[in-house]
Image: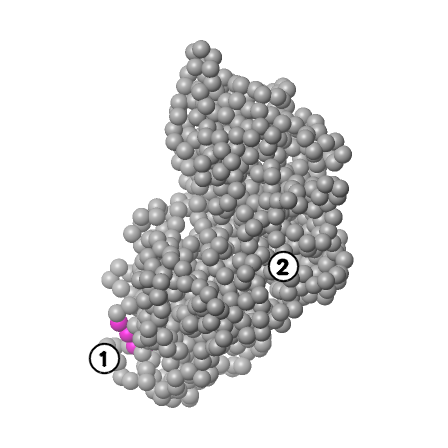
Amino acid sequence: MATSRRTFLGVSAGAAASKMVRHLANAVVLSDHNATAPSSVPAVLRVHAAPTQAVNSFDPDKSLGTSMDIQSRESIDKIYTAESIKVCLSAGWGPISYRLHTPETIDYWHWNPNGRWTDEANQRGYFIGSSELGDPIRDSFGYSLPHRGCTHNGGTDHGYSRLTDGDPNSFWKSNPYLAKAFTHEDDSLHPQWIIVDLGEYYDVNAIRIDWCEPCARAYEVQYWVGADPMNWEEPAMDSTGQGGDYLPVADQALGNWLGFPHGAVDEGKGGSVTLKLAHNLISTRWVRVVMTQSSNQPGPHGNGDLRHRVGYAIYEVYVGRLEVDGKFADFVRHAPDGQQQTATYCSSTDPWHTAEALSPHGDQTGWDLFFTSGITNGLPALITVPLIYSVPEDAAAMVAYLKKRGYPISWVEMDEEADGQYYMPEDYATLYIQFADAIHKIDPALKLGGPVFQGINQDVSVWPDARGRKSWFDRFYSHLKSHNRQGDLSFASFEIYPYDACTLKWDDLYRCRELTRKTLRAFRDDGLPAAIPLMNTESNLCGSLSVYMSDIFSALWLADNVGAFFAEGGALYIHSPIEPSVIEHGCQGWAIWGNALWDHDAKLICHTAFYYASQMINDEWVKHRSGTHHLYSVDVGIEDPAGNALVTSYAVRRPDGQWALLLINKDRDNAHPVRIAFESDGGNGHFSGAIRMVTFGSEQYVWHGADVTAHADPNLPPVISSIDASAQTVFTLPKASVTVLRGEVAGLAA
């Protein structure tokens, strides 16, 4: 399964910083340092500069941003100081995306600590935050769900499934909002399921289910034949191929669910049921129970709320073998511990919970602190609404609260990482519609989107439906269209975490453009209209910490990834995270996730390669607060013997009339001399007059990550040169570097 940024949230602790490194405006300035005659023949880079050849247009204040995610409770006070905010914003990014971590920990988010419970007397049930204005909300927390059915998802290391916890009184329950009472569709159109992963292959012929209420009247027990059924995305790919080949969507989750010969039940009665599934033993690892008709009987929470009577509930599940003497040999490990119990997965979870279930893990920044601290950079923010583990009324209340405060919102993401929660696309779509209805009753103008795929490199697949379709997004969007609700999808979003932290190598830089192309094109191939923007709302190199995140590698990757994203038609690029962090041990060495390293006393130690690359992108290549930029393609043609592009480039025409080229030299060992030609139907052009050249690479920055004393040495800011250019000027791109060339172009028609 491809990864998201989940694993860094436990260690990232953003913080204050006491000083700042020099801004690019105060960087080392040289004259013509990189314009000396090269020893080899320069390559000619050709910019397709005709106005009709622009491949994309974007406004940096809407399209180049960063994010704020969950923090440790101790870190909030350190991050949200004037000095820390200044450090965060100095990287140059524009808008900010509010990231929500509670879906990944299977928690219900109390965005407002004040609100009401459906069972107020017992402080339990379904919680709706108050939309009334009161004291500013500074902190907010998640609450663990007691009817959880997933041992693990794509991101949580905490908690456990109630299906195999060994407690006869605890139970899993499906999300009631996926039942007919709320979907207005037959329950068979939204079948709910549980999966037991035995961890290895066993010879199976029986299952025991201790049903709770509502139980299933109709259900079928199945087994999986094929590769891992929970692999809905391709394996991460490294330069040696050790991460596995990229699988076309038809080959992901490769296999089929087959019904046991005697696994179908049409008149289930509930209670404790033992089924002999087959006369002969069947070797399998994964067993699934698919439920299509509910008893609609009240469960342990009573009859007072419709949500207690719909869906499905199970106390405990056992998978094994019926011996000849009638005894049941159980292959399941039952324990209230996610590391000890047999793992289970489920289609959904009831968001019912209690006030006692406050999670000790992390602090979601309170809305008032977020919007008034300055971290939003004076720009509308992209916010996230919980959906999978929440209720529509709470989403509506949150939007009402923000609206009363007058906080500017650019876009609203509908939850995070539905694929990582193993949600079926049709189930996510029906919740999306219900929550969209609730939100648009408060503010019809809000622009909603999703599904916020986790760290993908290509299309996401799932088990085939009755029509044989496996593409997750195709089925999600088709469901919206079939209900005439495609208008509620104002944007499609996903996260970028393209590499595996432990196998990452320098050569993976060459794959950046290819991965970006495959990711964005998958949405269009699945039928997403060109008018609906594609948004990367969170990104970094890997889903877990790697030493490459602090290496010069990270600067080159970030610049190339930003350029490739817009060249392939992207609309919003979010680089994560914004806050400083302490040194941590990751794969292949010690590093940090972001822009700045600080110690446990909140004292700034140094900035990283990510920081300098961010400044070059935001302060040199583009110009914030200036309007729309137009992007043009550049033919380079500098390759190694294997055909890898050693140099990539992305050209923008800025609102001030200047042209700026972002150039990435991925060659670790060699500089490359280049000349720049601008080609247009109205004539050919070239840089002319004083050209600003800004370069940052391995000559300025080297990361030493062998131990806890990890640091950069040298750690110098980008080098700025002023070059008097002509058509014959040769610019030398230093080895392993990012360069921006900016200035006027002569010879092009106005």
Q: Residue at x 23, y 79 (%)?
A: 39
Is residue 671 in the magenta section?
yes
In x, y percent, where is residue 328? Answer: 47, 18
According to the picture, the residue beneath numbered tag 1 turns out to be: 39
Q: Which mark is residue 139?
A: 2
Residue 238 appears left or right of 50 = left
Which residue is farthest left? 39
In x, y percent, where is residue 377? Answer: 59, 71
In x, y percent, where is residue 256? Answer: 45, 31
Residue 374 appears left or right of 676 = right
Closer to the camera in the image, 327 or 562: 327
Q: Report the predominant secondary structure element of the magenta stretch.
A: strand
First in sequence: mark 2 vs mark 1: 1
Magenta residues (range)? 670-674
Q: Amino acid at mark 2?
A: Asp
Mark 2 → mark 1, Cα distance in angstroms: 60 Å
Q: Total marks drawn?
A: 2
Q: Residue at x 45, y 74 (%)?
A: 616
| Residue 321 can be seen, yes or no | yes
